[in-house]
Amino acid sequence: MIEPAREIARLLSAHQPVFEYRFGYVAESLRATTAGAPHATEIPYVFDTVAARYGKDLTAADEAAAKAMHAYWVGFANTGVPQAADDPAWPAYQRGSDQLMDFTAQGPVAGPDPWKVRMDLAQALNDHHEAGH
């Protein structure tokens, strides 16, 4: 997730709850050859279809990551809040704190965006460019 996603979260959060996430989980079978989670690799985790995606290369850690992520999406579908009974509470986005849910190899982690500094710099550069400097 890069800009303008955070800016959209900022704008929408003034009117409704917004839940932002970063997906950093990489399937164990790909970690030796993949530096980070490529775009859209969270989809099999959201729908808990990792067994079909990774087949014989699927690990218990991959399955656990899928179960956790899927539980949040089911919670959101049921209540309007992404929640999973045994996992950390997913904070609603607030402009000042930039809190999100980060899906990592260590499990879901709620807290400040680990890319906040990078995102702030991208926003500052964009603002500077738009101001005509």
Image: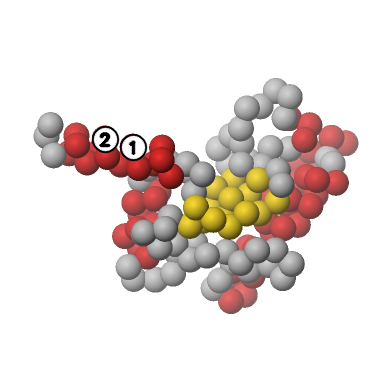
Amino acid type, label 1: Leu
Q: Which of 1 and 43 is in front in this view?
A: 1
Residue 114 placement, left or right of 107: left
Element under disc 1: helix
Residue linked to disc 2: 125
Amino acid type, label 2: Leu
Residue 52 placement, left or right of 19: right
Question: Residue 114: percent from the left, percent from the top?
Answer: 51, 44
How many labels were placed on the picture? 2
Element under disc 2: helix
Mark 2–mark 1 contact, CB under 8 Å? yes
Does residue 114 appear in the picture of this structure? yes
Q: Which mark is residue 59?
A: none
Alpha carbon distance from label 2 to label 1: 6 Å
Q: Nearer the viewer, residue 98 or 65?
A: 98
Q: Which residue ends up furthest to the left in the rendered image?
A: 132
Residue linked to disc 1: 121
Question: Residue 33: percent from the left, percent from the top?
Answer: 70, 23
**Rendering quarter of residue 104:** top right
Picture residue at 62% right of the left edge, 75% below the top: 78
Label 1 neighbourhood size at 10 Å, few (<14), some (14-19), many (20+)? few
Does residue 43 appear in the picture of this structure? no
Question: Residue 76: percent from the left, percent from the top?
Answer: 59, 69
Image: 82 above or below 128? below
Question: Residue 60: percent from the left, percent from the top?
Answer: 85, 46
Picture residue at 30% right of the left edge, 41% below the top: 123
**Rendering quarter of residue 11:** bottom left
Image: 13 above or below 26? below
Residue 117 placement, left or right of 59: left
Picture residue at 40% right of the left edge, 63% below the top: 94
